[in-house]
Amino acid sequence: MYFGRLYLIRDPDEWRIANQQLGYPLYIIPLIGVTRILGGMGLLIPNVPRLTEWVYAGLAINLSLAFYSHLNGGGSTWDKFDPILVMAFVFASYVLRRCMRANRWSI
């Protein structure tokens, strides 16, 4: 949700990275911000498992496309793997949430 907010308030650094390094057109950047905020809010809504599954699917697609954009864009080699690192955390969150919902685990 934090980075979605940066896209919506037109943070110059984030817009420069998205537009110049990754090649996103300027009209798509606010839409990316809105979808990131909606996805974060969707994860915070309790007791709606179908919505949660869709949000996790959207996050996986978003991060896969971000990895592809980083591979084809500029930046250092390590910056290209940031989406994969975030995807590992999203995957861990998904697995832990599924385990908690199945009552196999409780935190």
Image (cartoon, rainbow, N blue to C red):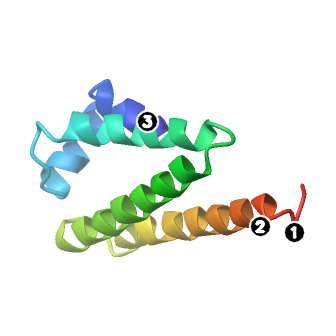
Residue extending farthest to the top is: 9
Q: Secondary structure at mark 2?
A: helix
Q: Would residue 3 be visible to someone looking at this image?
A: no
Residue at screen point 89% across, 55% down: 107
Q: Are marks 1 and 2 in contact (CB under 8 Å)?
A: yes
Q: CA distance from mark 1 to mark 2?
A: 6 Å
- Label 3 to label 1: alpha-carbon separation: 30 Å
Residue 96: x and y in percent read 73, 64
Q: Which of the 4 image quadrants contains residue 59?
A: bottom left
The residue beneath circle 1 is 104
12 or 42: nearer the viewer: 42
Residue nearest the viewer, comparing 52 with 59: 52
> Residue 2: horizontal and vertical position, in percent?
48, 36
Percent x, y of residue 31: 24, 37
Q: Position of residue 92 (x, y in %)?
A: 65, 68
Mark 3 and mark 2 lie on one chain; the one further toward the N terminus is 3
Which residue is disc 3 drawn over?
Answer: 37
- Residue picked out by circle 2: 99
Determine whether 15 is above or below 76 in the image. above
Rendered view: 6 above or below 48: above
**Residue type, label 1:** Arg
